[in-house]
Image: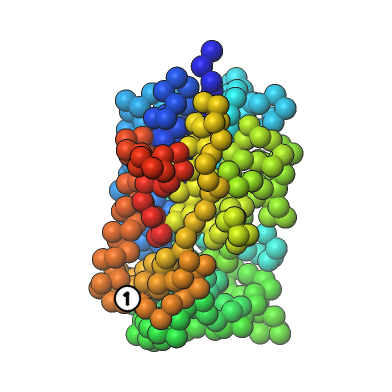
Amino acid sequence: MAHRIVVIGAGYAGLTAAGRASRLLRGAHVTLVNAAPDFVERVRLHQAAVGHTLHKHRLADVVHGTGIELVIGRVTALDAQRRELLIDTRGEPLGYDTLVYALGSGPDTAGVPGTAEHAVEISGPDGAHALRDRIRERAGRGVLTVVGGGLTGIEAATELAESHPLLRVRLLSATDPGDALSPRGAAHLRRVFDRLGIDVHSGARVEEVRHDAIALAGGRTVGSDITVWASGFTVPGVAQQAGLAVNDKGRVIVDQTLRSVSHPEVYAVGDSAVLRRPDGLELRMACATGLPAGWYAAGAVAKRLTGREPRKPYTFTYFQQCISLGRRDGLIQFTDRDDRPRQAVLTGNTAVQYKEAIVRGASWAARTARSTPERRRTAGESPPIRATA
Ligand SMILES: Cc1cc2nc3c(=O)[nH]c(=O)nc-3n(C[C@H](O)[C@H](O)[C@H](O)COP(=O)(O)OP(=O)(O)OC[C@H]3O[C@@H](n4cnc5c(N)ncnc54)[C@H](O)[C@@H]3O)c2cc1C
């Protein structure tokens, strides 16, 4: 029987891994399992929240002619001893010889009371569409609060404020939004917040989300007609429940070849894995880091199945952070290799065009990993592009 490689999760990381594995290992049987029938460009979901229709990439079309078997269904359990997956749309368990775990992440709504009940989130299409509908119900008026001053919160607040000038947009953040930027980058961000009328509250710790208000540490309460939760991501519990070695957030712990430290037949990539560089730096959850990890993992699997060892560990060199600030402005913050900001930034329309090219490139790279040629010298390890969106 052909070696069975099953990739779970068809996001940036999983789709890349499946595509490349199917090309490198023509004798293997590659199956790709995903909860939804489309590849979702998560990095555009704040656009969906303001009513843009995102391009639909049907997974059936993406894998057409590749030999990859596509299973649409949600993985409900992993039996790591029997090497089987339970999928809600299949009567029979799905067996594997090698598993690539790429289930991504979702909103982190545990921990702060009221968040799951009263806040909306934009980490998946359902959340983004629910936010769009809530804004429409209020005819684009009222107070909208974005909680979380990281990149997702910044992108959401600016997109929403630009598209809905009658909304009063507030950004609550425990830290200073943009505190990881260079002085020039932070100054540009402040200018954009001012121009769009976004009311920024730094040092705000949310203790409870209510139907129409948010309670802050220190006893203050602020009114909020719509609350958008953009304060961190959490990962599906499938790996933890299966007994794979995970960190305190449930993310799979992998070695330097992206192989589970507890289950060598399992590789984990993208948001649901703890990706570290050989120098120990933990990589940010990002499509920028996940996509090349999917590419690398497929190469590592291929090497081991053909009796070789990966030549190099997985590594990643930061170069930039690409931040959209609505459709008419943006910020490209160039960084050193360790993700620390350099002085250089791009802003305005140049940044908009730059980020759009990166986002398109990442989606294209994930969808075409099947046909991306190997570079001769680094075959087996290098990503197809430096996807640093
Ligand atoms: C609004 C927003 C903006 C962002 N902007 C940027 C940006 O500018 N740059 C950047 O680098 N990153 C950005 N990110 C982060 C980026 O989207 C993620 O880091 C990236 O999508 C992770 O890729 P992944 O392949 O690990 O997971 P995902 O892209 O989340 O894909 C996971 C897949 O697994 C599927 N899945 C989940 N659970 C199951 C299950 N139980 N069974 C079957 N299938 C399942 C999902 O349906 C999905 O298709 C942004 C995120 C958001 C929400």
Q: Which of the two residues, 208 or 24, is positioned nearer the viewer here?
A: 24
List x then y, in percent, for residue 35: 50, 38
Task: Pick out the residue farthest to the top.
Answer: 1
List x then y, in percent, for residue 343: 41, 81
In the image, residue 213 above or below residue 31: below
In the image, residue 59 above or below residue 192: above
Q: Residue at x 33, y 58 (%)?
A: 358
Q: Secondary structure at mark 1?
A: strand
Q: Is residue 250 visible?
A: yes
Q: What quarter of the picture does the C terminus occupy?
A: bottom left
List x then y, in percent, for residue 192: 37, 82
Q: Which of the two residues, 255 or 101, is positioned nearer the viewer here?
A: 255
Q: Residue at x 41, y 39 (%)?
A: 379
**Pointer 1: what residue?**
346
Determine which quarter of the picture holds residue 113: bottom right
Q: Is residue 74 visible?
A: no
Colour pattern:
rainbow
Q: Residue at x 39, y 55 (%)?
A: 387
In the rendered view, does 220 fall on the left or right side of 319?
right
In the image, residue 292 above or below residue 191: above
Mark 1 burial class by Cα count in 10 Å: few <14, some 14-19, many 20+: some
List x then y, in percent, for residue 206: 64, 74
In the image, residue 98 above or below residue 251: above
- What type is the residue that disc 1 sits on? Leu
